[in-house]
Image (cartoon, rainbow, N blue to C red):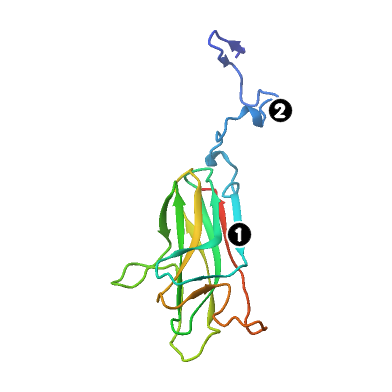
Amino acid sequence: MAIAINGSGTITGISVGGLPDGIVDTDMLAANAVSSGKLASGVGGKVLNYSDVTKSDTQTTLSTSFTDITGLSVTLTPASSASKFLIMYSVFCAASQNVYSTTIQLVKVVGGTASDIHRGDASGNRGRVTAGHWSEYASYDQFNSAVLAGQVIHAPSTTSAVTIKMQFRTNNHNYYSYINRMEADGDDPTSGRAVSNIAVLELAA
């Protein structure tokens, strides 16, 4: 078939493989023009974006409502509403010896609206949390502490900026909960300081 250019700009008569190598380059492809179905087997499913933070300073709270762990949040803008987030967190926490309960939760913020993610089912008056550190009461245990860590797959289902952050609380407003330190905080090697961190990876669908 002869190659013909009609009046509307359409070219006909070109057979498969008829274009010279290199004539179609990256600049000629429209953004997001290549779907996953056009990729070779094993290609795709990659990490599109990544952000992480480490908190090394300490923080305390007397709040029985969840409060932000300052400096322990990351913000990513998904490339696609089909993307998923792999969230990895590690929080060092402790509680006063008369309380023995510090709980944390993951929160997603989109467009100024916050919502809890990855927490337990509702059950009576029990708290719905992502993770917690509970222990028996004791007359003396100022060194009681725990590392709360985990991994979560979450689908933000948006292309707007998404902030993932950590919050914590005490179960009694008369007694502190601590981040990155124990209740015992003497200036000696037995009173340690620790770090907490959160990392978020955007995964292609």
Q: On the rendered structure, is 101 left or right of 31?
A: left
Q: Secondary structure at mark 1?
A: strand
Q: Nearer the viewer, residue 178 or 90?
A: 178
On screen, residue 31 above or below 84:
above
Give the residue type at disc 1.
Val
| Residue beneath the point at 61% across and 68% down | 57
- Percent coordinates x, y for residue 144 in the rendering: 53, 83
The residue wearing badge 1 is 53
Q: On the rendered structure, is 119 left or right of 85?
A: left
| Residue beneath the point at 56% across and 12% down | 9
- Percent coordinates x, y for residue 34 in the rendering: 56, 36
User: Can residue 156 be seen in the rendering of this structure?
Assistant: no
Q: Mark 1 or 2 closer to N-term? A: 2
On screen, residue 181 above or below 121:
below
| Residue beneath the point at 47% across and 46% down | 82
Residue at the outermost right position: 21
The residue wearing badge 2 is 21
Give the residue type at disc 2.
Asp
Q: Quadrant of residue 12?
A: top right
Q: Are marks 1 and 2 in contact (CB under 8 Å)?
A: no
Q: On the rendered structure, is 22 left or right of 116?
A: right
Residue at the outermost left position: 124
Q: Secondary structure at mark 2?
A: loop
- Percent coordinates x, y for residue 22 in the rendering: 71, 28
Label 1 CA crowd tier, 10 Å (few <14, some 14–19, many 20+) = some
The alpha-carbon separation of the residues under discs 1 and 2 comes to: 45 Å
| Residue beneath the point at 61% across and 19% down | 14
